[in-house]
Image (spheres, rainbow, N blue to C red):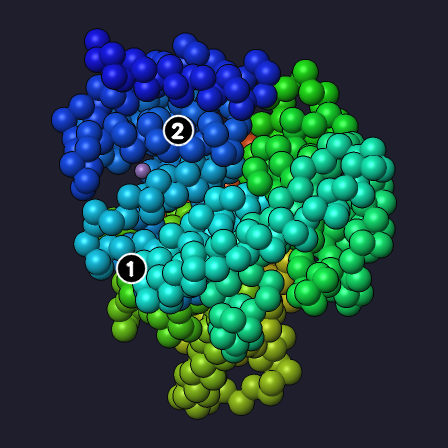
Amino acid sequence: MFSTFYKKKLDELLYHCHRNLPAGLANDKLISQAFKFAYEAHKNDKRASGEPFITHPYDVALILAKEIPLDSVSIASALLHDVVEDTKFTFKDIKAEFGNEIAEIVDGATKIEGMFENYEMKQVESYKKMLLSMTSDIRVILIKFADRLHNLRTLEFLSTTKQMRLAQETLEIYAPLAHRFGLSNIKTELEDLSFKYLERKSYDDIAKRLKQKKREREKFIKGFIEPLRQRLTEQGFKFEISGRAKHLYSIYKKLVSRNKTFDEIYDLFAVRIILDTTNKNDCFTVYGICSEVYIPVPERFKDYISLAKQNGYQSIHTTLVSKEGRMVEVQIRTKEMHEVAEKGIAAHWKYKENTNQHDANLENWMKLVRESVESVSKEDTSKQVLDSFKLNLYQDEIYCFTPKGELKVLPSGATAVDFAFEIHTQIGLRCIGAKVNGKIVSLDSPLRSGDQIEILTSKNQTPKLDWEKFVVTHKAKTDIKKFFNTERRNLISKGKEIWERKAKKHKIHASDESLSRVVHKFKYKDTGQFFFTLAQNESAAAEIIDVLTDKIKLQSLEQKPTEEEMKPVDNLASNFNRYVDDARNSTEGIVLGNGSSQNMSGLKFDFAKCCNPIPGDDVIGFVSQEKGVRIHRKTCKNILNLFLKEPERIIQIKWSDKGVGEYTGGIKIIGEDRPGILNEITKTISKNFNSNIKSVDIKTRSSMFEGTLILSIQNLKQLNQIIEKINNQEGVFSVTRYEH
Ligand code: MN
């Protein structure tokens, strides 16, 4: 399938995997399969250097196997990391071929690729967090380190602009992250390579001077080390001791920060003593011995063993004065500590026995790694440990860009509306839509780290009530609330003006107290709520005006009107009442039995549609030659008029005691206009009462609805029960018997 050359390459990779990966973690089959897949996928592609593209993912995998050995899944993912980005193969293809775990890692690496390409290097701290928040699998980040390292090693083939961008991005984001992950080798190389492209002159200068002094330095180191080697050997320690120049970028930083010349900097190199022991106390013993050989500088002593660095680094640092009077930094650590320093977290689980250090961890994550190392035995390897490596850093935050590349940090779950308010209150208030990565999305859909969001606004837009339900940021919540409060205040004062105008027109002189009492009868919470409603719908005043100009209306609102209250009180009505009483005295009246429109006692009768009388109502009849007797409620306005015109045709009516049957009655409901409320009301009626709904008429106005329901009713008692039941329903402001 591929040449002997690539066969050899694969063998080399497998060799390093077996050498460096923890026992049992090198899966030859998986790695070979990934290598072949990547080889085929990238077959026709070349790198900027002219080399076949496969050399890049291959080298990335090799860096991973040699320098951050984790597991075969990482190696396979590294081989495949550019397949989705650069070839016709998709996430689905990778998933089908290699399963979800590898597909997710490749997907993560693809998303991070070129993340910052279009943005100026500002807010670097947030960029770092963003990278971490975007991935839940640590292996994505580790592959990106290796990827970045290889890209920098081969940076010379790219344009100057690209070189500068990649170098700066690496220096600002990837190198510090590698440091945080405890990968000192990778961090050092990333820094020096970036430094080389960003500050070529300083880089060359320092490199040249280091080279010039190399011989002198080596001679000095040799002389300095020798007595130490001798004494430690005498004491029976197994160890390695070496001295080497610090890396170029750290020297450069010292030159800049201390404002000194190259010749004035003494600590250009450090001596390292690595003890082949598992006893950390040996480090302190060795420190004691060193202090006997050379004079220590006490203020330069640092104990990173008792208190590890945030990235897990452990070592003793001391500075000793040489016989020539030069100060030399000496680092003392165990082999395990050294490996952790070089290879970071991956080294942790190579060692079963771990120190019981109390670590000050910047990230809880490091603690997690440590705990997993302590609880899992060396043999009981990968899966379990890797699962606990799942990153949980900054997962409660998301990092999103404005179209101009400004980064906004939001709590996870934040929506486009939150983002809009984050930019500016006015943008939030006028937000009508959002484009996320160029696509229109609904305002309530949650954003994700790395999204670029463009907010669409309209000057006519105002916040919607349902926004309050999905926004998560404090700012959005407060701004929206503030808007609605102001809006409400404005509407209330507008409604008040409307009311005052209407009151004047209808010559109503109601005190605040009596107005408050009346609106309360209509189930408004207070006059404020009434004014608020009025501002949106002037006709809401009609009922209140009716009540304040006509007391009968008010009484009909009482839930259980008394007999006394039911009596008409004005002169006209009094006359009518007296007449009826007279009629009652003079005749037996007609007694109504069963049914609604029949002949009874030889008399044809029906029920007036204007007032829909039902058994229990006080009723009266009006006799006409063609239609027989039409029965009205005593409180009906029509019957009052008829009585005025032709009092002689009024006839007394009584309900029969055993009156059963179906009659027609109506109710009028005012309530909050929200989805489902009508359904709830009709359900209440059909579920609790043996009543059919004959017709429904609903009018909505802003956030209120007004509904008239015509029902089949047995008697007044039942109607009152229905009214009471609906009245208790949430969102219902008032229920009254329907008076046309
Ligand atoms: Mn790559």
Q: Nearer the viewer, residue 83 or 340?
A: 340
For residue 593, what is the image quadrant? top right
Q: Would residue 51 be found to the left or right of residue 635 on screen?
A: left
SS under mark 2:
helix
Which kind of residue does numbered mark 2 sit on? Ala
Residue drawn at x 41%, y 14% is 30
Name the residue located 52 percent from the left edge and 37 percent from the top edge: 138
Quadrant of image for the N terminus: top left
The residue type indicated by label 1 comes to Met
Place of residue 308 in the rendered image (x, y in percent of width and height, measured from the top left): 72, 49
The mark nearer the N terminus, 2 or 1, is 2
The tag on residue 61 is 2
CA gap, disc 2 and disc 1: 25 Å
Dot 1, crowdedness within 10 Å: few (<14), some or many (≥20)?
some
393 or 626: nearer the viewer: 393
Could you say which is closer to the camera, residue 633 or residue 255? Answer: 255
Determine whether the beta carbon of the residue marked 2 sits less than 8 angstroms from the nearest atom of ligand 1. no
Query: Where does label 1 land, which residue?
Result: 164
Callout 1 secondary element: helix
The answer to whether 547 is drawn above or below residue 140 in the figure is below
Q: Which x, y percent locates residue 374?
A: 75, 30
Depicted 349 relative to depicted 315: above or below: above
Q: Is residue 193 above or below residue 477?
A: above
Question: Residue at position x 14%, y 26% from top?
Answer: 44
Residue 519 horizontal/vertical position (percent):
56, 72
The answer to whether 684 is drawn above or below residue 11 in the figure is below
Res 220 seen here? yes
Count of numbered tags: 2
